[in-house]
Amino acid sequence: MGKRSWISDAVIIVVLLLIAGRAINLPVALFLVSGQSMYPVLKTGDLVVGEAVYLTDYHVGDIVVWYRTFSYGVIHEVVDIRDGTVITKGVNNPAPDPPVPSSYVKYKVVMHIPRHIWLPSLVFFAGLYAYYRRRDILEAFKSPEPGALTVAGWILAFFILLDMAVIFLSTVYYDSYRVTIQPPSVSLRSVRLLKDRPTVEVVYNVNGTHITSVENCSVGAGKTLYECSTISYTNNTVYAGLPRQAIIDALKKPGSVPTVILHLFISFKGGNVTGEYSVIIPWRPLDIETLDGRVRIVNPNLLPVNVTIQIQYYAVRNGETVFVSKTTPKQITISPDTTKTIDIPRKGSFARVVVVYPYKPGSTRIIQEVVRVDFK
Amino acid sequence: MYIVLTPLYSFRGVVSGEAAVAWYRLEMNGEKIHLSTLDTIRILAFPLYTLGFFSITIGILGSLLVVMKPRLKQVIMEMNLAAALSAIIYSALIVQLGRLIAREASHLDIDLVYTNNAGLVNFGQTEVYKHITTKLLEPGPVMLITTAYLILTMVTIILSREKRV
């Protein structure tokens, strides 16, 4: 009985030392896993045995125990070690933990005891211990000495030990909400006018959500509000077609940079965004150039441009330039972002091609450009 | 047991659900969320469940046993005394757990209505409702309840001894 009692007492002392290990930074300590952050590697209620980092080295991929204060700690996997800091992450968490100084890392997990093993074992060994000490226990319960409070002492000791064990074994991750809760967020990445068509592309940085529909899309030009001509979207991008009249209104507005305001009301998963985005409508003169007896006119704008073309032919005789003939002014329309090539029939020595087009849509002012085409 | 099992905070909005010491059920945009702190609180509260269960059992069984087997009265009294003293010791734990839950509840009070370069972003807000039971986790009421428990136990012991004399 004496030897048995000594063995059971020794086991209890070892377990208590393991439980209290981290408080005094013993070479080995026992920890209780709480939470889902390491699921399925570690489950709530599992026990892990940690070996002090002053005895062993740890690397990326190892599970370590770090704690900032006695109670503030974490059992997570190392994902990065750099510049004296360690970044850990719960394998089931969406984001890594904030970096902590490497001095916070106290133990490397070297053994894992699942709860379905240690819990029944504990009950078994506790029963075994109670069995060995049954006479003492029964004696205390059968005829307690009045005033000695033996039973009360036993029970009080049990509850104190239980409390201490749970506190010593558990680590609390106070800021866990930061890495487990990822609230959806939306911010604007870019707004740009597509080059090939009058469409505004609005791109958002989205996190944890996506566009589900575009509830409202309108374009303000001056005091008038127009419905978008087309609407389409992907997970994070909206394409809003600008109505022709909105562009014309913007370009017509005198004395300022031609601008339209795009009003969007977009539904995202879990929320919505109401935004107003200013879009500058560029208007550039036509690109006119000659190439191999032809004139090439490029319309870089969003609207078609009506162009009047007249060809004047000249001949060079005895060093003098003589007017030969001219064509009737001809009107053509050049579509947005397209190139029109005009063949110039050969007549005389060269031709002057007069291109006339409005300064801006709706403007009474005109631009007149003359290019020369030489006939070899 | 009542304090441990009753919801302390309710959440509506972005985060919805309820949180008690012994359990929590939280969702964010319809998806269940787990918080390590609340998981740990459940484990830290394990001694409280044990003590609660022990106190209730002793309270019920003790009353029956005292009538049926009067010789066990001394043991039952001592058990009650131990439970009352343990409750005093656990009062610090109870208060601390209450503070931990309050801290987590404040973190879940998420406001996702803000303005940035995208415009007015509205992903809703969370409304946090504090149940009356949170008051029971404050130091005053906890000390009052545990001290009252101890005093009543002591009075019972003293009265039972007087009767025996």
Image (tube, coloured by chain):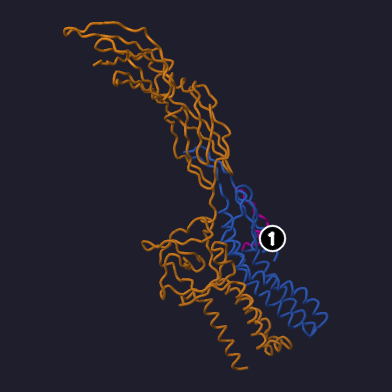
Chain colours: A orange, B blue
Number of marks in picture: 1
Image coordinates for residue B73, horizontal then vertical, percent: 77, 82
- Residue A168, visible in the rendered structure: no
B23 versus A354 height, above or below: below
| Horizontal relation, residue B78 to residue A31: left or right | right
* Residue B133 colored in magenta in the image: yes
* Disc 1 residue type (three-letter): Thr
A142 versus A324 height, above or below: below
Quarter of the image where the N terminus of chain A is located: bottom right
- Label 1 resides on the chain identified as B
What segment carries the magenta color?
Answer: B126-138
* Foreground residue among A224 and A161: A224
Image coordinates for residue A280, horizontal then vertical, percent: 42, 28
* Foreground residue among B116 and A279: A279
> In the displayed image of the protein, which residue is found farthest to the bottom?
A2
Image coordinates for residue A298, horizontal then vertical, percent: 36, 23
Quarter of the image where the C terminus of chain A is located: top left
Rendered residue at 59%/69% (across/down) = A45
> In the displayed image of the protein, which residue is found farthest to the left?
A318
Mark 1 neighbour density, 10 Å: few (under 14) some (14–19) many (20 or more)? some
Image coordinates for residue A355, horizontal then vertical, percent: 34, 14
Rendered residue at 83%/81% (across/down) = B68
| Horizontal relation, residue A62 to residue A311: left or right | right
Question: What residue does disc 1 label?
Answer: B6
* Foreground residue among B63 and A332: A332
- Residue B21, visible in the rendered structure: yes
